[in-house]
Amino acid sequence: MSEKQQASVASSGRFAVFSYKATPYLYVAPFFILFLVVGLFPLLFTVWVAMRNYNTITGDSGWAVCGAVCGTRDQSLVGNFQWVLHQRDFWMAMRNTVSIFLLSSVPQIIAAVFIAWVLNANLKAKTFWRMGVLLPYVIAPSACGIIFSQIFSDKSGAFNVLLQTIGLAPIAWHADTLASHIAIATIVNFRWTGYNSLILLAAMQAIPTDLIEAAVVDGAGKARTFFSVTLPLLKPTLIFVILNSTIGGLQIFDEVQMFNNGTGAAGGANNQFLTVSLYLYNLGFNKVTIGESNIGRAAAVAWLLFLVIVLVAVVNFSITRKLADAETRGKKRMQKKAQ
Amino acid sequence: MTTRTKNGMGTPALEQIYGKNVARTAKRARAKLVMTNGEKRAGWGSYLVLSIALLAFLFPLYYAVSIASQNSTDTQYGVRSLIPGTGLMKNLALAFEDINFWQALGGTTIVTLTVSVSTVFFSTLAGFAFAKLRFKGRNLLLTLVVATMTIPQQLTVVPMYIMTTKVGLYGSLLAVIIPGLVGAFGVFWMTQYLEDALPYELIEAGRVDGASMGRIFVSIALPAAKPAASMLFLFTFIGSWTSYFWPMLILGPNKNSMLTVAASALKGAHFTDYTLIMSGVILTAIPLLVVFVFTGRQLVSGIMAGAVKG
């Protein structure tokens, strides 16, 4: 402590009181200042950009105009939104994003629960197995995308070689719509299944042993115990995992951009695996034309994507709450019976 | 919940006769008994399932090495690429030159370390205030922190790009560092941890001894926060190291200043020569794989303790 500080502390109790009152604000300030700069301000700014005729290079030039696709040259606050909603590629990207999201999250969560259940057994070398399933997590999503673009190469990828070896026809993992969605979903599953299984494993270990014991004593087998005791108790964690994969999954970009082979559009020759984030990137940053509202339209896409994320989250939440309600009702009924 | 074993009385009966402690001990002993009967030693099925999972997780890495080790640069790898060739070192050396490995590694290291250290420090600072200090607006501000965790990155990408370009940071590592200096998740995580881990008595004792707030933070809060802080450091480190979208967007032509971007740029430059592209991927993956070998144990316990990012 400097002499000056010592003097001030000693001379005035008022300073000490002030210092005690002010410190908490001082401590939380760095976060909020940064949030103001890289969070709140951009959030407000993006509302503005989405309404403007904003070019990536030349900048702002008045309110947005939807243009030829809407058959109007009038300026409008929602011009960018109208333009985006008139694009076939946008709807294609929406469809692909939701499809890839479903193909990745559903099997992934089922596999993660299963792996967690296996990991929860009394294993030898526990840490080894747990670390093993976590390994893919340290490989960057973009790197995963490159590796899997080769595993799922249409001509001579590992998967097709395998199929041909056992006498099956090769699959066009890039050219075909559904096949490409499955391939990209596999990249996501590769990286996140083990990670999620560890979260679920922790939740399983938190289940009181006397609950499992009671089920076993009542004569329930392993499967019965799992479905009637373990799974219902995992629900809060499952909701957390599902919400996480929703927010992440709908924004998917790295894996998809790197999945594309060779030249051509990054979402595939016919945009068969173009996602919303990739569309946003192409629109705002990759295919910039002077005179067009590139980045303004990209901002509009961002808001539409946000809307979908919120919508899916709300649907998720209400479904799980309904299930929870049903369960509470069931429990009450059981309690009544017991009485 | 009544617990009853086949021989002997239920826990409530034990509790009535011998008291709570005896009942609890009996319950635990029985739980152990059931565990040892039913769950002791996982069967070979468990090991089989886990081995298959592990092989599935390892195969892509093996395949990457296998492609990177081929000698010919034609695109028809086919069956041959499942069997490693002899060109691994040669290809790695080529990729090493091509992506300017030391520069990319240096850039990624600078970004990742700055972001991780800063996130941990400011998160602990804010977490300490939220968990242990009383001040007006505390609840409101904490709610705000939680709310900001739900904002998707894509929503702020457009304005951040415009702002970064306007202040002349396009292409600079600072453009990658600044948005990552502190995050809502870290603040929330440290708040939660310090609420339980740091007793008020310790802070009071510090105050009675005449320690300043700063002194209390450094000498009392920081040591108490260490376990959670090191987890936060590790996860921020990996998140930052593997990030691609924002760095790719904002580094622009300076592709070789970070590893993920450099490796992906190889794909644009040599889109048919996968021996070289995979070599680049391997080079960029190696540093984090090394980190994983040393910290994998902590990562596992971190995820299981809830150190997961939303």
Image: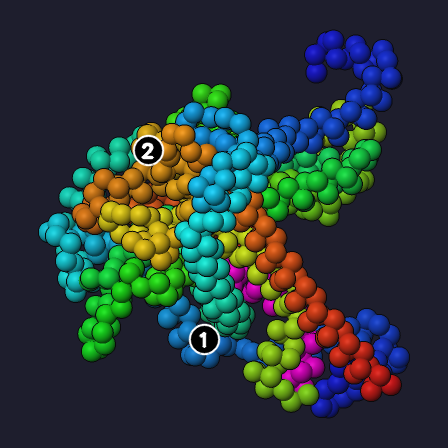
Viewer-nearest residue: B178 or B93: B178
For image coordinates 70% across by 82% down, the residue present is A214
For image coordinates 46% across by 34% down, the residue present is A293
Span shown in magenta: A192-217
Mark 1 secondary-structure assignment: helix
Mark 2 secondary-structure assignment: helix
Residue B15, labelled with which disc? none
For image coordinates 69% across by 31% down, the residue present is A28
Q: Is residue A195 magenta?
A: yes
Q: Amino acid at mark 2?
A: Lys
Instruction: Characterize the magenta stretch by its predominant secondary structure.
Output: helix
* x then y, percent, for residue A63: 55, 31
For image coordinates 72% across by 75% down, the residue present is A327
Q: Amino acid at mark 1?
A: Ser
- The quadrant in which the N terminus of chain B is found is bottom right
Q: Is residue B49 above or below residue B175?
A: below
Answer whether residue A127 is visible to the viewer in this image: no
* x then y, percent, for residue B58: 34, 61
- The residue where tag 1 is placed is B46
